[in-house]
Image (tube, rainbow, N blue to C red):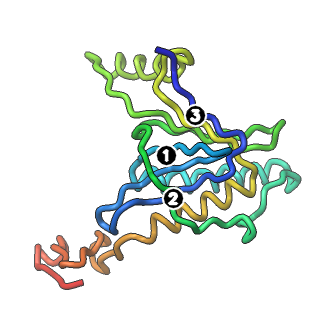
Amino acid sequence: MSRQVFLYDPPDRFVAGTVGLPGRRTFFLQASSEGRTTSVALEKTQVAALAERIDELLDEVVRRTGGNAPVPAVAPADVADTAPLDAPVEEEFRVGTMALAWDGEEQRMIVEAQALVELDADSEEDLAEAEERLLQDEENGPPMLRVRLTGAQARAFAKRALDVVNAGRPPCPLCSLPLDPEGHVCPRQNGYRRGA
């Protein structure tokens, strides 16, 4: 079976969002264009890392081009997207590996999210080799979401993604672990249960 690539070049919309209540949220990347929508599930930490790396890569592009690249310093207000995910949210796959690149010729950010794949190997070296072969296999590799964004779209995506990540449960002032509405067993208090 050949690899399934969900390509959005460019998307009408590319956002990070959640389904569920804080503490029990499922995180998604969602791309849509011309009546089709693709949603892929991932971890909160993956969303945060993706947003931070996008901002870092865009900052580096601006630095290397001396400010000549069409990349805004901050997310433009006119491309901000605060709408919820498009319903129904149907997971195509769970993300394992992500990659970022900047296409200097087209002046576009490329975001790739590949499906999580379980590999069996006898050693760490064999596992690394199997992972590399799988990721480079354009014919039979795991399903992939590939999105090409303008600098402004990428900045707006990163800002929204960080806002979504930070909209969860507030952190405990002592241990920084998330506070649940029903209380929190704080390791810094030797397990004493604090109210929210």
**Circle 1 residues within 10 Å: few <14, some 14–19, many ≥20:** many
Q: Quadrant of residue 122?
A: top left
What is the quadrant of residue 77 in the picture?
A: bottom right
Marked residue nearer the N-terminal end (2 or 1): 1
Q: Quarter of the image containing the C terminus?
A: bottom left
First along the sequence among labels 2 and 3: 3
Q: Which mark is residue 64?
A: none
Spatial separation of the CA atoms under disc 2 and disc 1: 9 Å
In the rendered image, which residue does mark 3 sit on?
6
Is disc 1 placed on a helix, strand or loop? strand
Residue 36 in the figure: left or right of residue 116: right
Separation of marks 3 and 1 at Cα, in angstroms: 10 Å
Q: Residue at x 51, y 50 (%)?
A: 29
Please count the marks in the image: 3
Looking at the rendered structure, the kind of residue marked 2 is Leu
In front of the other: 25 or 178: 25
Q: Position of residue 165 (x, y in %)?
A: 45, 64
Q: Which residue is mark 2?
A: 85
Q: Residue at x 46, y 19 (%)?
A: 134
